[in-house]
Image (tube, coloured by chain):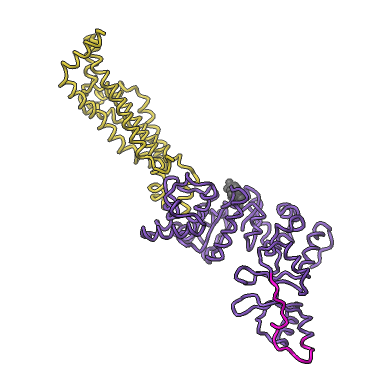
Chain colours: A yellow, B purple
Amino acid sequence: MDLLLSFIEAASARQEQLIAAFQAHLLLVVVPVSAATVVSIPLGIWATRNEVVEAFAIGVANVLQTIPSLALLAIMIPLGVGIGRRPAYLALFLYAILPILRNTYTGIKEVDEPLKQAAQGVGMTDLQVLRKVELPLAVPVIMAGIRTSTVIIIGTAVLAAYIGGGGFGEFIVTGLSTIRDDLILVGAVPSALLALLGDQLLGFVEYLVTPKGLKI
Amino acid sequence: MLIGPSGCGKTTTLQMINRLVEPTDGQILVNGRPNTEMDVVQLRREMGYVFQEIGLFPHMTVAQNISVVPDLQGWSAQQKQQRAEELLELVRMDSDIYIDRFPRELSGGQQQRIGVLRALAADPDILLMDEPFGALDPITRSQLQQELLELQQEVQKTIVFVTHDMDEATKLADRIVMMKNGHIVQIDPPRDMLRNPEDRFVAEFIGPRRMLQDPLDVTVRELASNGAVRASSDLRLSEAMKKMRQEESDYLVLLDGKNRFAGLVSADDVSRAANDADKKTSVTELADRQTVSCDESVFQAVHKLARSSSAGLGVVDEQNRLVGVFTKTGFVDILVEEMWPREAIDLPEED
Ligand SMILES: Nc1ncnc2c1ncn2[C@@H]1O[C@H](COP(=O)(O)OP(=O)(O)O)[C@@H](O)[C@H]1O
Ligand SMILES: [Mg+2]
């Protein structure tokens, strides 16, 4: 009860800081995820068309994903990208790639073989097969990848505060070093809420982009 | 009509015609040209393909599925809509109800119909149909087969049809290609294949002698002889005699100007009339005009023939066009073959 009261007090005392942290956190999610989407979708499509790209892209993305997120952020410093927002964006971007890339790739690969053959068989070019059949059918899966990526990055962005990236993580970092539970909560609660909200929102988007014929 | 056991290469053959699979050897001529020399996309668009797995696009409506090829060919929205409605009507599906539905909302039979319509949409000259009625209950299947026969009467296309069902083959085919392990075993019209299977494999595939077992199930179309000597109905008696002698036939099938059945005359009748003092001048007056519809069963045809004084019946379609003849002597030949098949009795082969 005490903790709750002191949390509310701490939060209301920092309204302006909270709004700034919210904006920064949002950017820490939107910028890397958007960039990762723009890169991963074409790359994922390419990987379904070319075995070299397939092995390389999926392999590299897998490796990136296995690097602990804090390590990936921290490594930006010795790599010379420095500290602050830019290295945070870069690290989170790398981290956001895999779910989108993998879902684009499998979403297209998993379109039924007979359907692809029918699309070819009626005389579609490879590009038309992609545009008219594979992509529309893969869109829900790709969207699910974007959603997974977003939720992961909302969480991981908290760690960006360690390299000066800002966001809700700042409260947590400060709270941890000064051993103040209320401050930790000021960072943790909104970032958790943001993750839940983002998940719900993108779940709805996923539903919207699912072709009508698949919902029946 | 390609037929053969599962895995014998029927689908692969269609895929090679359409170039979804490239042959390792030999070539396939389409309208006289090797298909490998043609633009592959163009070739496919000019050829309707009904896939074994149907392969309707689940995210597209019935109208969009039907219009896939017209769409690729750049038809206007109005043309596509009109064509889709027209085609749905052809298979007796109400376009108001179905045109905006999705494949998942359709029954199996309806999906197969749409698969056929998709292949027909851009009015290709060649249709490839891979077991299009495969996964259906017998009633729907026979209904769709009937629709296809009617459709073919109207649209007249080259159809390469794959099936593993001998009844379907005999009902629909002009020629049956029996396949086994990627090879052709026999190519013949249904009637010849039923009567003279090339070897044990074909005989066993055809199954027990259908005609004796199910005389109601076998249509006269299958047994009608189409090798009969044809002549114009305004032939004079002397000309008719000459023609029969030349062709060594003991009867003539008469056709009118529009290729419709006009009667059957026997050599006996003609020679008797020719010797008669008060000569009739035209063969038509001697002709027997009894006919039987090609879709009647052999059972009904035999009864009609037994009650008739004529040597045979004309087998005709709905427009009275000649499909073949069903004669008493021909039927005796067939019966003998059915009851004592040559390959079973092991008689020395007569040529
Ligand atoms: N002439 C052939 N030579 C080699 N393999 C063949 C040949 N014909 C068919 N096959 C192979 O046999 C398998 C079954 O063929 P398929 O055409 O699907 O059979 P069906 O449609 O008659 O059931 C396929 O894997 C195909 O590649
Ligand atoms: Mg097959």
Question: Image quarter for residue B295?
Answer: bottom right
Q: Which sits in the foreground, A129 or A185?
A: A185
Task: Tell me which residue sits at (65%, 49%) in the image.
Answer: B5
- Looking at the picture, how far across and down is residue A201, in whole percent? 31, 31
| Residue A181 in the figure: left or right of residue A112 | left
- Looking at the picture, how far across and down is residue B282, in whole percent? 69, 86
Q: Residue furthest top?
A: A2
Q: How many marks?
A: 0
Question: Image quarter for residue B209?
Answer: bottom right
- Looking at the picture, how far across and down is residue A28, in whole percent? 24, 28
Q: Which sits in the foreground, A185 or B213?
A: B213
Residue B170 in view: yes
| Residue B197 in the figure: left or right of residue B163 | right
Task: Tell me which residue sits at (39%, 44%) in the image.
Answer: A136
Residue A83 in view: no
- Looking at the picture, how far across and down is residue B246, in whole percent? 73, 81
Q: Which residues are magenta?
A: B273-291
Q: Quadrant of the C terminus of chain A?
A: top left
| Residue A165 in the figure: left or right of residue B223 | left
**Magenta segment: does it hold B197?**
no
Give the vertical position of B79 relative to A157 (above or below).
below
Give the vertical position of B214 relative to A181 (above or below).
below
Q: Which sits in the foreground, B286 or B6?
A: B286
Question: Image quarter for residue B143?
Answer: bottom right
Q: Quadrant of the N terminus of chain A?
A: top left
